[in-house]
Image: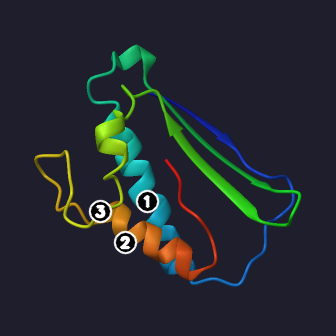
Amino acid sequence: MTTELSLSEAPLMTHADRTLLLQVIVNLLQNAIDAMEETEPSCRQLEVSSTEAADGAIVVSVSDQGVGIPEEIAVRLYTPLFTTKSHGLGLGLSICRSVVEAHGGRLMA
């Protein structure tokens, strides 16, 4: 797997619970890695970027080269207790969205 990190040159400052936002990022990274399980190992690529939007919002993006999210799953992605994994509880993205929204942000797939 290759990893590409593209972070803002200037530090991006915000008032937030560092621990909670770190947990969100860890969860998103793990989901991205899990999404690439069926991808040919030489094609697995994980990209993480951060930037400041024109309105001053901080944008953090985690993307992968997984198989994609079918529409019927995408509509339920943030539903508590919904999972497509054999080892998941279905709480990760629901909690992540709640944390991000509690900080005034948005979480999008």
How far, Cα to Cα, is label 2 from label 3? 10 Å
Disc 1 crowd, CA 10 A, few/some/many (<14, 14-19, 20+): few
Q: Secondary structure at mark 1?
A: helix
Would you say the residues marked 2 and 3 are in contact, meaning their CB atoms lie under 8 Å apart? no
Q: Position of residue 3 (x, y in %)?
A: 54, 34
Kindly identify the residue that appears in the image at 62 percent across and 70 percent down: 105
Q: Report how far apart the C-alphas of labels 2 and 1 lie in the structure.
A: 12 Å
Report the residue marked by disc 3: 79
- Say what amino acid the circle numbered 1 marks: Val
Q: Along the line of sight, which residue is nearer the eye, 80 or 67?
A: 80
- Vertical order, 28 against 11 (above or below): above
Alpha carbon of mark 3 to alpha carbon of mark 1: how far?
Answer: 19 Å
| Residue 94 figure quarter | bottom left
Q: Which residue occupies 27% across, 30% down?
A: 37
Q: Amino acid at mark 2?
A: Ile
Q: Which of pointers 3 and 1 indicates the residue nearer the eye?
A: 3
Q: Is residue 28 above or below residue 1?
A: below
Residue behind mark 1: 26
Nearest to the observer: residue 53 or residue 30: 53
Q: Is residue 53 above or below residue 68?
A: below
* SS type, badge 3: loop
- Count residues near mark 3 (Cα–Cα under 10 Å), then give few for <14, some for 14-19, many for 20+: some
- The earlier-in-sequence mark between 2 and 3 is 3
User: Observer-nearest residue: 19 or 55?
Assistant: 55
Q: Quadrant of residue 36?
A: top left
Q: In this view, which residue lies farthest toward the left?
A: 86
Mark 3 vs mark 1: which is more N-terminal? 1
Helix, strand or loop at mark 2 = helix
* Disc on res. 95: 2
